[in-house]
Amino acid sequence: MSLKLNPTAVQFAKRLIEEGKLKNDEGHWGQHNPDTSAENKFLDKHEIEEYGQWHLGLDMTKGEDTKGRYHFPYGDFKTVHRDGLIAAKERAAQQGYTDIENAADELLQALEQKAAQ
C-alpha cells in the first residue's frame, strides 16, 4: 500500500487547532478513535470529502468515495486529539511515511502550543 499525505486534512487540522477545537489528552488513542459505527453515523450526515479531512493519509489506489482511501485519523469528527496525532505520527514512522509523520509532528507541536496558551 502506498499512501501519500492528505494536504486538505493538514490545513483542516491547522484551522481546528487555531480555533481551539482540540483535546490535549494524554490517554490512549484507542479510547477516542471513532469506531466503525461512529464513522458511519458521521457519513450519514456528511460527504466523504468531509470524512477525508479527518485523515492525514490517502491511498490513491482506492476509490475517492470509499472509507478505505483514508488513513491516519487524528480526531473524533469534532476536535483534534493530541493522542490521535501521536498515534498517526508513530504509525507513519513505523511504516516509512515520512511526509505524514512530519505533518503529524508539526500539528502536534501546534496543538501543544495552543493548549499552553
Image (cartoon, rainbow, N blue to C red):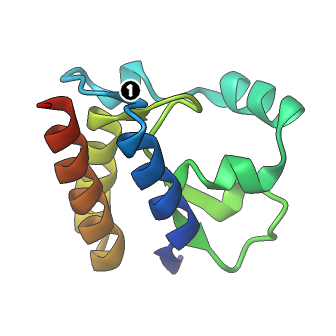
- Residue 18 visible in this rendered orientation of the protein: yes
* Residue bearing mark 1: 30
Near-viewer residue (110 or 38): 110
Quadrant, the C terminus: top left
Near-viewer residue (5 or 111): 111
Percent position (x, y) of residue 64?
A: 80, 68
Percent position (x, y) of residue 76?
A: 52, 29
The relative height of residue 111 versus residue 109 in the rendered view (above or below) is above
The relative height of residue 6 versus residue 104 in the rendered view (above or below) is below
Image point (85%, 61%), residue name: 65
Amino acid of disc 1:
Gly
- Left or right, residue 64 beside residue 87: right
- Left or right, residue 95 beside residue 40: left
Q: Quadrant location of residue 69? A: bottom right
- What is the crowding at mark 1: few (fewer than 14 residues within 10 Å), some, or many (at least 20)? few
Near-viewer residue (5 or 71): 5
Percent position (x, y) of residue 109?
A: 17, 51
Describe the element under mark 1 as helix, strand or loop: helix
* Numbered marks: total: 1
- Residue 6 visible in this rendered orientation of the protein: no
Image point (70%, 79%), residue name: 61
The relative height of residue 52 versus residue 76 in the rendered view (above or below) is below
Q: Quadrant location of residue 86? A: top left
Image point (78%, 31%), residue name: 40
- Left or right, residue 17 beside residue 90: right
Q: Quadrant location of residue 18? A: top left
